[in-house]
Image (cartoon, helix red, strand yellow):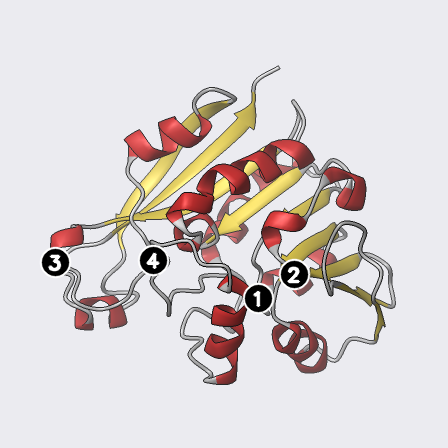
């Protein structure tokens, strides 16, 4: 889900085409072969031991988090704009799936569904997805989605989250902080607390759960000119 090969600070009409180019060039250093450690760490807090919860993962790529959540008995609903990523996920995870081309309100969208019916990938522009399509969800796991959304599109992205969440929804968000003046190469956009408050403060209660240095774990960011980079995890819940 951390799709960090393109700098997305200007909204462009071909944002989907940009991601297609990323996947076709195999510039997917954001992809991990194991479940995300933040998701694993907070899983118990997100679920309280319940199964059958609806987990929503926007801009999922081919993250193995999907399979991990499904294997743990959760109903996984995700969006991904690149067909190649969707098909690679099912192929690499050896999962049987069906494919259909009827997603209301989306242009050229497709639905990839695991044979279990408990894992669905909506292949479409993430800004096009609405609650009539995926209904209300119990958990949102945003790892690297908000940080790569074009800045002018952030409002629309947040409105989309509002549309599929309710008062009981838990939102787990992973972001980055770093000095923009140091950046010499492309990287995910930094989001500081003031940005989080501006995007979520009027409709969510916000808890900063932890922050940690992440350059050692992701040295390619150091190669891009950064001397410090902090990973920040937030846990949020919409206000009643």
Instruction: Residue 167: name its quadrant.
Output: top right
Kindly identify which numbered label has been placed on residue 63: 1
Give how far apart the Cα atoms at labels 4 and 1 are. Answer: 17 Å
Kindly identify which numbered label has been placed on residue 66: 2
From the image, state whether disc 4 or disc 2 is nearer to you. Answer: 4
Q: Earlier in the sequence, mark 3 or mark 2?
A: 2
From the image, state whether disc 4 or disc 1 is nearer to you. Answer: 4
Give how far apart the Cα atoms at labels 3 and 2 are. Answer: 34 Å
Instruction: Residue 12: name its quadrant.
Output: bottom left
- In the rendered image, which residue does mark 4 sit on? 188
Q: Earlier in the sequence, mark 4 or mark 2?
A: 2
Give how far apart the Cα atoms at labels 2 and 1 are. Answer: 6 Å
**SS category of the residue bearing label 3:** helix
Is 44 situated above or below 236? below
Q: Are marks 2 and 1 in contact (CB under 8 Å)?
A: yes
Where is residue 231? Give x, y as percent.
31, 49
Give how far apart the Cα atoms at labels 4 and 2 are. Answer: 22 Å
Where is residue 112? Give x, y as percent.
78, 67
Q: Earlier in the sequence, mark 4 or mark 3?
A: 3
The C terminus sits in image quarter: top right
- In the rendered image, which residue does mark 3 sit on? 182
**SS category of the residue bearing label 4:** loop
Give how far apart the Cα atoms at labels 1 and 3 are. Answer: 29 Å
Q: Is residue 36 left or right of residue 131?
A: left
Is 178 situated above or below 33? above
């Amino acid at each position: 889900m951390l799709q960090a090969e393109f700098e997305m600070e200007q909204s462009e009409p071909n944002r989907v085409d940009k991601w297609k180019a990323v996947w076709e060039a195999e510039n997917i250093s954001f992809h991990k072969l194991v479940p995300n450690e933040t998701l694993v760490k907070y899983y118990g807090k997100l679920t309280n031991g319940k199964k059958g919860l609806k987990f929503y993962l926007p801009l999922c790529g081919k993250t193995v988090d999907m399979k991990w959540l499904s294997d743990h008995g959760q109903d996984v609903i995700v969006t991904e704009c690149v067909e190649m990523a969707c098909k690679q996920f099912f192929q690499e995870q050896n999962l049987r799936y069906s494919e259909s081309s009827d997603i209301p309100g989306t242009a050229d969208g497709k639905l990839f569904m695991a044979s279990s019916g408990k894992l669905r990938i909506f292949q479409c522009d993430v800004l096009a997805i609405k609650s009539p399509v995926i209904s209300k969800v119990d958990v949102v796991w945003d790892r690297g989605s908000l940080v790569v959304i074009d800045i002018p599109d952030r409002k629309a992205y947040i409105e989309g989250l509002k549309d599929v969440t309710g008062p009981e929804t838990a939102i787990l968000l992973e972001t980055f902080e770093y000095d923009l003046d140091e950046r010499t190469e492309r990287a995910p956009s930094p989001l500081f607390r003031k940005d989080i408050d501006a995007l979520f403060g009027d409709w969510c209660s916000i808890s900063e759960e932890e922050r940690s240095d992440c350059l050692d774990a992701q040295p390619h960011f150091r190669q891009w000119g950064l001397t410090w980079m902090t990973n920040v995890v937030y846990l949020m819940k919409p206000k009643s």
